[in-house]
Image: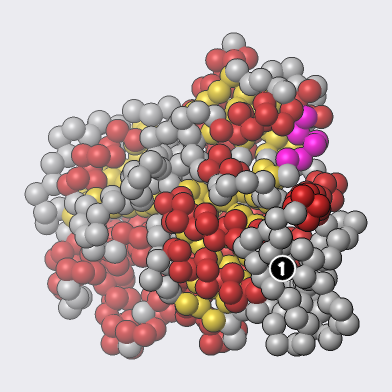
């Protein structure tokens, strides 16, 4: 049994089965049922690094309050195969339930007596409705909605939407399967029905979105004109969203042959005046690093999304990690402005993506957005973002300018940018170059060019937003962290009035207010999903502050609120 904190008020539902049984589609549909019933949700998905097959699970955390992290415990387990029971029965807390198909020979002998067993003949019900075995997940959804006082009409509406392309007959058949299972529960398990999905009276309109989708949607809203993305877990869904929307929103998505081609295509598009982006993982970014430096040297805007997963080499590619911070901060040879931001959830993924596009144009530099697999693929319910079509292209002109110097000196290090074809002659040169772009190896040109480029960081650091401090200013313990740990930390510190959390989203240039906060902290705890504590090392490099208390996790799994609570208690000696 796992530790369970009842004060969290989060209902944890988990569905598991074999790849191909529609685990994620069913889980996401149940999450939508919860959201349309007035609840907040957070999903967490696990699947093996296989092209086909393997055990898949999806957890849906449901709460009337905001929920932003997966939980260690499970309240309701939907088992579409035996492996789900074997792998996850230990997560169940007293009073939990297991829903399974009793037309299969499931072994439940290891289940504790305080767990309610809910055997339902799914295959028989599906067959009675005229459906196929592929609809077992639909039957499970119908039963789950019934067992938690959910609204069957909401589920039917979602089936209509999700199966719209399959035709009216398929929609009706899936709705019939759901109804048969729904009715079976009300006829046989009336005393087992709870109210975890009972529609609330006050329902706020929200959208369910994961980090990948948020990045793609924000890119479109930010005026994206060109994206070159080679598919690589965990950012592949960015290209899926972009590809299906390019005609509607009038931008170009290109799937190149590899990551090297991707970044060079995107640099070329940006050089021609387009707002450009690439997205990849750590391994793909390694291949992109030469282009990264090229964009910096020719001062060409570019947004690079880097979705972290465990390395080195192929590692465990469908799991999560935060081991690429040092990589992106030091990639490519030499010194040049490295602008690096890191999102903590889907909402920040949306907000920071727009910021990345504006920073790239304003400072004429590549800008990296770091996310991790948990952010990329974890669905959250968030308010529908307000319409904001403001775009800052910085010093950009298509006018004809006499004696145009593309790399002319400027107090902020940013020159007036033009594009080919408007009459302003210049050279984009990977060699060191003078103000027109001509190659030069003179001392004066080299020093002036380097100082010009690097002075951008001096200006940018003064414009950085203060990093967010959650909780009271005066605390016995200050947690510092980044990325997807944010949700678990915020969930955990709800139990403490003497613990605060400094969430860092801007890694380079490094925000000066971090030192101000940590200098006055009584005790500091660094929380990261990597082996070496890379943020703590960065903090020591930039501030001189040595953090000795760390909670580091490098299994590929997320840090859970329960683990953080345990660590806090050990440090505060509670």
Query: Which residue is drawn at the image coordinates 75% and 87% (left, top)?
Result: 422
Circle 1 residue: 438
**Residue 277 percent across, percent down from the top left:** 58, 68
Quarter residue 97 falls in? top left
User: Which quadrant does the N terminus fall into?
Assistant: top left
**Residue 52 percent across, percent down from the top left:** 22, 60
Query: Which residue is drawn at the image coordinates 51% and 22% (left, top)?
Result: 566
Quarter residue 20 falls in? bottom left
Q: Is residue 548 visible?
A: yes
**Residue 152 percent across, percent down from the top left:** 41, 69
| Range of residues picked out in magenta | 510-515
Given residues 521 and 34, the one toward you in this image is 521
Residue 472 shown in magenta: no
Describe residue 455's horizontal placement relative to residue 66 as left or right: right
User: Which quadrant does the C terminus fall into?
Assistant: top right
Furthest residue to the left? 105
Furthest residue to the top? 573
Query: Which residue is drawn at the image coordinates 11% and 54% (left, top)?
Result: 104
Is 294 placed above or below 549 here?
Answer: below
Is 392 placed above or below 412 here?
Answer: below
Query: Which residue is drawn at the image coordinates 62% and 14% (left, top)?
Result: 572
Element carrying mark 1: loop
Is 564 placed above or below 572 here?
Answer: below
Is 124 placed above or below 564 here?
Answer: below
Please give the count of numbered marks on the rendered protein. 1
Describe residue 149's horizontal placement relative to residue 415 as left or right: left
**Residue 482 percent across, percent down from the top left:** 61, 40
Describe residue 328's horizontal placement relative to residue 463 as left or right: left
């Amino acid at each position: 049994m796992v530790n369970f904190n009842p004060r969290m008020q989060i209902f944890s539902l988990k569905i598991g089965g074999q790849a191909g049984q529609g685990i994620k589609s069913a889980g996401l549909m149940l999450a939508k049922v919860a959201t349309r019933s007035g609840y907040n949700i957070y999903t967490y998905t696990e699947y093996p690094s296989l092209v086909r097959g393997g055990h898949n699970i999806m957890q849906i955390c449901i709460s009337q309050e905001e929920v932003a992290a997966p939980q260690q415990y499970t309240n309701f387990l939907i088992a579409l195969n035996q492996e789900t029971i074997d792998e996850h029965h230990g997560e169940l807390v007293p009073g939990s339930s297991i829903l399974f198909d009793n037309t299969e020979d499931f072994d439940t002998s290891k289940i504790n007596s305080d767990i309610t067993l809910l055997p339902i003949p799914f295959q028989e019900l599906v067959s009675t409705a005229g459906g196929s075995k592929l609809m077992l997940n639909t039957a499970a959804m119908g039963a789950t909605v019934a067992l938690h006082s959910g609204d069957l009409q909401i589920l039917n509406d979602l089936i209509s939407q999700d199966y719209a392309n399959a035709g009216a007959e398929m929609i009706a058949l899936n709705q019939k399967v759901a109804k048969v299972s729904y009715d079976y529960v009300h006829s046989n398990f009336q005393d087992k029905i709870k109210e975890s999905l009972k529609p609330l009276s006050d329902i706020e309109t929200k959208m369910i979105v994961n980090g990948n989708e948020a990045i793609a949607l924000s890119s479109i809203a930010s005026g994206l004109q060109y994206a070159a993305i080679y598919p690589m877990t965990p950012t592949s869904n960015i290209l899926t969203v972009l590809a299906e929307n390019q005609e509607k929103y009038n931008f170009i998505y290109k799937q190149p042959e590899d990551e090297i081609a991707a970044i060079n295509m995107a640099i070329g598009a940006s050089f021609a005046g387009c707002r450009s982006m690439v997205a990849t993982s750590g391994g793909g970014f390694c291949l992109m690093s030469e282009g990264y430096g090229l964009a910096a040297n020719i001062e060409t805007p570019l947004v690079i999304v880097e979705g972290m997963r465990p390395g080195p080499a192929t590692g465990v590619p469908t799991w999560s990690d935060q081991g690429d911070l040092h990589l992106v901060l030091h990639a490519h040879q030499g010194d040049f402005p490295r602008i690096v931001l890191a999102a903590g959830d889907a909402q920040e993924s949306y907000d920071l993506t727009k910021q990345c596009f504006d920073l790239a144009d304003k400072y004429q530099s590549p800008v990296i957005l770091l996310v991790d697999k948990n952010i990329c693929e974890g669905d959250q319910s968030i308010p529908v973002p307000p319409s904001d079509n403001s775009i800052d292209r910085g010093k950009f002109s298509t006018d004809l300018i006499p004696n145009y110097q593309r790399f002319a000196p400027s107090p902020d290090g940013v020159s007036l940018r033009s594009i080919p074809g408007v009459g302003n002659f210049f050279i984009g040169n990977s060699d060191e170059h003078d103000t027109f772009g001509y190659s030069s190896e003179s001392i004066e040109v080299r020093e002036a060019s380097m100082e010009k480029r690097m002075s951008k960081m001096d200006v940018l650091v003064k414009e950085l937003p203060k990093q967010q401090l959650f909780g009271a200013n005066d605390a016995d313990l200050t947690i510092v962290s980044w990325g997807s740990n944010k949700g678990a930390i915020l969930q955990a510190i709800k139990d403490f009035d003497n613990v605060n959390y400094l969430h860092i989203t801007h890694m380079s240039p490094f925000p000066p207010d971090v030192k101000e906060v940590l200098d006055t902290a009584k005790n500091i705890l660094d929380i990261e999903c990597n082996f070496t504590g890379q943020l703590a090392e960065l903090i020591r490099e930039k501030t001189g502050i040595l953090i000795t208390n760390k909670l580091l996790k490098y299994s590929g799994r997320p840090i859970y609120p329960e683990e953080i609570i345990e660590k806090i208690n050990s440090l505060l000696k509670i």
